[in-house]
Image (spheres, rainbow, N blue to C red):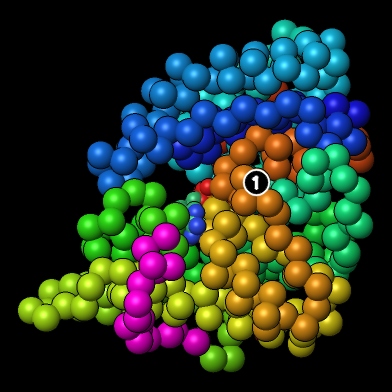
Amino acid sequence: MRVLGIESSCDECAAAVIEDGRTIRAEVVASQAALHARYGGVVPEVASRQHLRTIVPVVEETVAAAGGWETIDAIAVTYGPGLAGSLLVGLNAGKAYALAKGLPFLGVNHLEGHVYANWLHVNDETRPEPEFPAVALVVSGGHTDLVWLDGHGRYRRLGRTLDDAAGEAFDKVARLLGLGYPGGPVIERVAREADASVTLPRAWLKGTYDFSFSGLKTAVLHLTRERSAPPAPEVARGFQESVVEVLALKTAEAADRLGARQILLAGGVASNGALRRELARVATVPLRVPPVRWCTDNGAMIAAAGAVRLERGERSALDLDVEPSLKLASGPSAR
Ligand code: KG4
Ligand code: ZN
């Protein structure tokens, strides 16, 4: 089965065609990062208007590269979580194409998409499938969720952030340090070049799998106000170390204690090399990480998550609405 995946939840307008839930046939990602950079963050109105301009060319270019509409069997589209105006553009485009082409249609949870980037094949090579039960750490600009997966589509929440998402913390700290937007890649780059690192607090929230990054952000704010503030790269390195250490240790500990067979790392912050290395170092069960280009938002991950559900016969009605606050797993955090 060939699935067209469409993603427009934030500032990436993206589409991809994948085969059998795993193999990429065509992929286009139109990033709006440069457009939002001058504002220091994503401006929702600017994002939705730009999606309106790019959605049709992005989808048409992807489908043409995959061999045309007659090669497509189904359409999977992000319907939440994300910015309402941005989600609406992709979802309505997906619905309209499904209706016009007579194709099955499915709404996909964006966070599930991030997790399923781990099922995509790299350069057509066949990797062994990720194994269940798994512990997934989803770290993006809007979310930090630690979840238990005991089968396809079966999630239980272990923990989440109580305040800022990890990516949001990277973006805010980069702004405090005058490093620009998006913050994650630039913090990673300057941290690599720093000669030293400033020691910053770690919020362990012992006895839970929850996270908190707002205290760390405030600590950076206070540092930048000091008259003899340390150089930005040293603060950036200390900040990254603090985030990475807590994320990696708590994830490894959850997987170990709960008897997971796999750790799945996912989301934009999963492209961070320090996090990938630290989690690999402390994990006692095999770690799976998507290639960097499928960590940040893309259409292939939406097609991959959609394919698993479509193959099981799931379909969405054409009156499906966007859900800006959609969760991956609900319920209280649990030990
Ligand atoms: O998953 P994503 O593309 O969009 C959301 O669903 O939010 O994640 C974007 C987030 C941004 O906050 C960005 O700063 C962060 O991922 N990010 C990184 C890196 N690359 C992107 N954070 C840390 N290190 C990176 N290399
Ligand atoms: Zn995302």
- Magenta segment's dominant SS is loop
Q: Pick out the residue farthest to the bottom.
A: 206
Quadrant in the picture for the C terminus: bottom right
Q: Which residues are magenta?
A: 189-204
Question: Which residue occupies 42% across, 28% down?
Answer: 48
Q: Position of residue 281 (x, y in %)?
A: 67, 80
Question: Which residue occupies 81% across, 73% down?
Answer: 286
In this rendering, does residue 264 appear at all? yes
In this rendering, is residue 249 above or below 135? below
Judge by depth and name the residue closer to the eye, 208 or 245.
Answer: 245
In this figure, what is the number of numbered marks? 1
- Tell me the crowding category of disc 1: few under 14, some 14 to 19, or many 20 or more residues within 10 angstroms, Cα based: many
Q: Position of residue 303 (x, y in %)?
A: 75, 36
Relative side of 10 to 68, left or right: left
In this rendering, is residue 324 above or below 24? below
Does the magenta portion include 203? yes
Q: Position of residue 99 (x, y in %)?
A: 73, 13
Question: Which residue occupies 21% across, 78% down?
Answer: 230
- Quarter of the image where one finds residue 189: bottom left
Judge by depth and name the residue closer to the eye, 7 or 233.
Answer: 233
Judge by depth and name the residue closer to the eye, 20 or 158.
Answer: 20
Question: Which residue occupies 78% across, 11% down?
Answer: 68
Does the magenta portion include 244? no
In this rendering, is residue 85 above or below 180? above
Residue type, mark 1 in image:
Trp
Q: Which residue is mark 1?
A: 294
